[in-house]
Amino acid sequence: MGYSEVYQSWQNDPEGYWMQLAEAIDWDQKPSRALFETGEHLYEWFSDGRLNGCWNAVDRHVAAGRGDQVAIIHDSPITGTQSRITYAELQTRVARLAGALRARGVEKGDRVIIYMPMVPEALEAMLACARLGAVHSVVFGGFAAHELAVRIDDAKPRAILAASCGIEPGRIVAYKPLVDGAIEQAAHKPEFTVFLQRDQAPCELEDGYDLDWHAFQEGAEPADCVPVEGNHPAYILYTSGTTGAPKGVVRPTAGHLVALHWSMKNIYNVDPGEVFWAASDVGWVVGHSYICYAPLVHGNTTIVFEGKPVGTPDAGTFWRVIAEHDVKSFFTAPTAFRAVKREDPKGEFLKKYDLSGLRAIYLAGERADPDTIEWTQNLTGKPVYDHWWQTETGWTIAGNPVGIEPLPVKIGSPTVPMPGYDIHILDEAGREVADGELGAIAIKLPLPPGTLPTLWNAEDRFRKSYLSHFPGYYETGDAGMKDADGYVWIMARTDDVINVAGHRLSTGGMEEVLAGHPDVAECAVIGVADELKGQLPMGFVCLTKGVNRPHDEITAECVKRVRDQIGPVAAFKLCAVVDRLPKTRSGKILRRTMIQIADGAEVKVPATIDDPAIIDEIRESLKELGYPKG
Ligand code: COA
Ligand code: AMP
């Protein structure tokens, strides 16, 4: 069957289609049916089945006689180390960690926060939770204590699993003060913490409350897999929305496993036993799905890479890892290739490595610009496939179904909807627009297995954020179009979410931080185009009447504030003091106009602007920040 037939077969009989795919994973009790409607426009999948995520990712491969296969390769150029863990070893390690957690009272349904760098223990922590039916919530290491505190208060974890440090080029990030700071700020107090001590910067542990990772597990009785219901949350992953309060995306166990298993062959075209590498971080959805769960559930070898595309030690690192471990499919964000291209435009480093085993490169996380795709394709001679998805969906909405049938690549489009996704392009009033016309991208409900059924403890927000604008559809927050061949084109976000080096961030969240500065009366943060990172945040602040301090002092404080409260990952370094912000007569800040000026694009000033003279003032401020570029 080709792509059209597979898509059609899903459309003709979604229930039968998903029930058949569910056969690929192991169940303690098979579900009686696939789709469950739980309320108006609310759906779940495989709810009455019973299974365990860790069993599917680890134990079943051992049971099938594949225990000696390498499950995880840790390749850490930043520490100069490498290690390998087989499926059998992984099973032993995870069962023991799960046993230790259980001995401290962690049970099915309890939440556990994981705040760790790119080490195999991060995956082991996730899998140990899954083994017990505990719900993990991994927090990216680039977030500051305040962001961690917000997540602690929302998820109310019983425990935090952490490492003593992460390592960034040129600096060691001590995690202990961040964890301590977060627990101090949070109203909810976890019962205990466990720290993996790393040689680069061990931390001091407070007796009784902070436990040492190895001592914690010593002598623990290994825990068996606890079967959970198909709709049981496997994890909560917080992602940026319009405000500073992150959204807790809930990932249900069964749908997640079924969809991810399917994706490994049909999208990434790998067979069990082969090496698959997603160069992302466990703190993001790409890390959850494609460093941890999907490759393991499918019986692949996954790579946990602790390094950067450049500087660890050079722009040849990606090629080295691919050649050395015989990676068959490689997945990263376009920004990573932009970084490599900037350092090594002619691909001199590539000449040192044999990439003959690599079949294809996959890009996602942000818009893949045609220059980057073409450069990567020309240099490597490999197909480069863009694919589009979100934290909310957990797997590809639109991609190239290479394992079914490679479709012709149209550079700039992530290709076509995957089975399960019925994509529509709608105008403001919810009417379908014609092919080639821009609109809001919406997906007809129900969303397929693996996608979010709701937000953690926030069903109202879930409805408001995703379901209320276009009744009967899920609103993706992206704008774009479909062409006559059914290809999807993703053009921009329709909300205040920006994408900085493949990291999803909220300008609204940054505005909340700036507004908290005692001298700031009003502010706006916009995302401006950046050659390397895709977008960068830029802040404009108006001062409280009577404040008479040097502007550069205030902007430096604003920059520090965002770094301290959101984290270095926000990459907030551009900030200007302005007298006033451009607004409509009804008081709405004209952010889009400001973005157009900063990007050097055609500026369309709305007729409703309150005072057109402000536009020139904004131009002047932008000039001082070096914008527009070039
Ligand atoms: N822990 C602590 N700090 C972190 C961090 C982590 N896990 N990850 C990033 N940071 C810090 C960086 O050190 C940097 O700090 P600085 O301001 O002191 O320099 C800051 O956050 C911004 O990081 P980033 O935006 O990643 O920029 P960079 O200049 O360090 O690196 C790239 C640029 C393009 C090389 C890098 O962003 C990259 O590898 N991107 C790949 C994207 C990716 O994996 N996306 C995931 C979704 S698929
Ligand atoms: P995240 O939830 O961090 O994965 O970010 C999801 C958002 O990133 C999407 O809603 C898009 O705005 C953007 N995005 C992800 N993949 C792509 C892609 N292939 N093309 C364009 N934008 C993308």
Image (cartoon, grey):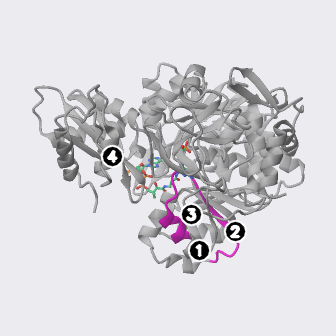
Residue tagged 3: 411
Cα gap from disc 2 to disc 3, whole angstroms? 18 Å
Q: Residue at x 31, y 37 (%)?
A: 590
Left or right of 601 on screen, residue 54: right
> Which element type, helix, strand or loop, lies under badge 2?
loop
Please tell me how crowded label 4 is: few (under 14), some (14-19), or many (20+) other residues with Cα within 10 Å.
some
Marks 3 and 1 close (CB-CB < 8 Å)? no
Q: Nearer the viewer, residue 592 or 293?
A: 592
Query: From the image, which quarter does the N terminus lie in?
Result: bottom right
- Label 4 or label 1, whichever comes before in sequence order: 1
Cα gap from disc 2 to disc 4, whole angstroms? 39 Å
Q: In this rendering, is residue 319 above or below 144? A: below
For the image shown, how many numbered marks are present on the structure? 4
Q: Nearer the viewer, residue 120 or 21?
A: 21
> Which element type, helix, strand or loop, lies under badge 1?
helix
Q: Residue at x 43, y 50 (%)?
A: 172
- Label 2 or label 3, whichever comes before in sequence order: 2
> Which element type, helix, strand or loop, lies under badge 3?
loop
Residue tagged 2: 359
- What residue type is disc 3 on? Ile
Cα gap from disc 1 to disc 2, whole angstroms? 10 Å
Residue tagged 4: 595
Query: What percent of the width, then of the height, locates residue 309?
Result: 50, 62
The disc at residue 380 is 1
Q: Nearer the viewer, mark 3 or mark 1?
A: 3
